[in-house]
Amino acid sequence: MRYAATIERYLDRHAVAPPPWIELAAPNEELRICVVIPAYDELTTIESVIRSLHVDELPDDAVELLVCVNNPEDAPKRVLEANRATIDRLRGLDSSFPIHVLDRSTTGRAFPPERAGVGHARRLLMDLATRRLYETGRSEDGLIACLDGDSPADPGYLDAIWREFAAAPPTALAGVCNYRHPIPDDPEHARAIISYEAWMRYFEAALKFTDTPYAFQSIGSCMVLTAAGYARADGVPPKEALSDFYLLQKVAKTGGRGAVMELRQPLVRPSARPSTRVPRGTGPSVRASMHHGEERFVFVEPPSAFFDLRRFFSAIRPAFAQPQTLQSAASPFLSEILSRWNGWKTIDKLRAHAPDPQRFERQFHTWFDSLKIVKYANRSREHRGAVFLFDALRELLTQTGALDVAAQIPDVSPKQARIDDWRRLLDVLRAHHFAQRTGR
């Protein structure tokens, strides 16, 4: 068992102990997948999420559900009542799989306000799932599948994630499922969610073009991790927002290129509802687009920023033997950003301590991580100006050689674009697979 010691160390030193009122029956010996679902004010949607889960290839005993119904102690009365009703409904729900309800909602059991939020709930769930998979001897292949209380999966989800991980190389420690936000009929709401999802797909495609190891989406309800991958990453950060982003980034850092893979068949449908429950993510982004005239996802980071990043990243490994190649590979703006970050000196130190080009490249990408890429892209947007999403996608697709797909992007201006054009844009993106541009 390669990772048994890693999981033992994590559970002993870092895992959150469940509070004393949470006592669960021992896991079934056949357990292979723990589905973890944080639920806050999900009374009207949680049951449909659970009903979406079934297996055809795996035995029912291979799956169990862990649901943390949670809120801060000072939550509004309406939320408290909805969560209490959710707990009652889940405890009486007939399901093919065991459902373990973790009460972090009722009086005396809710999270303190300073330690509330989806990150804390997900941490409790995933730590508990890791412990249960370890107890059943699934340190090597046990999976933790993350969903949300308003984001159902399509048929075949559980069988597909198990099948794809079983066929994956040993380096795969996590995966991100395919996703499609439901598109509402209301044109304003539809445009908001379409522009957001289209931007997400644009940004992911741009990351793949640069050949960064972090070219994957960070959607909490689409994450699947091995117990070993989760333990190696020291668990999910208990943040109010972006905990999924930081968790997957840490998995990629600890596991290297290929540690986070793209799951092709399992499909999740993240909620498209506007929300203020967390400061960042789909809900707040959709709400901003609808109610504040937010154009953030209509005018996006310029493709040229990613073209420059691709050129620079491709020079990293050769620069181990020829350091001067990096200066010529960096655009003036990227060179300026690196200077602000003390990057040139950092890169020199990484080169001096790396034993070979491969490890120099890995150490570089550990430093120039997802967060730095996002910061660089945002600065590029400010410096060079934002680009209309339709035009940005067409330029990116042309650069990657996908001319046939680029030709399918509606040729409209920002003022001309109608809801049918936006729907067509999203259909094209959903049908096209953006492959990672790497020779490794």
Image (cartoon, rainbow, N blue to C red):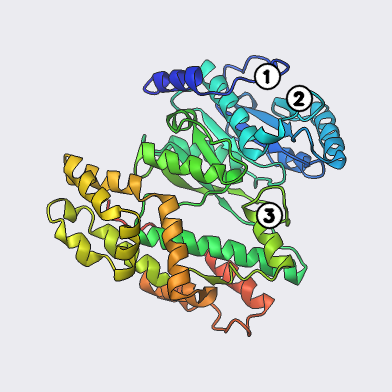
Do we see residue 409 in this rendering?
yes
User: Toward the viewer: 308 or 52?
Assistant: 308
The number of callouts visible is 3
Task: Give the labeled residue for mark 2.
Answer: 109
Query: Are the residues tagged 2 and 3 within 8 Å (C-beta)?
Result: no
User: Toward the viewer: 140 or 159?
Assistant: 140
Q: Secondary structure at mark 3?
A: helix
For marks 2 and 1, give the CA distance.
9 Å
Q: Which amino acid is tagged 1?
A: Pro
Residue 19: mark in rendering = 1
Q: Which amino acid is tagged 2?
A: Arg
Where residue 125 sits, quadrant-wise, is top right
* Horizontal and vertical percent position of residue 250: 43, 39
Q: Nearer the viewer, mark 2 or mark 3?
A: 2
* Horizontal and vertical percent position of residue 109: 76, 24
| Label 3 Cα crowd, 10 Å radius (few <14 / some 14-19 / many 20+) | some
Task: Give the labeled residue for mark 3.
Answer: 283
Q: Secondary structure at mark 2?
A: loop
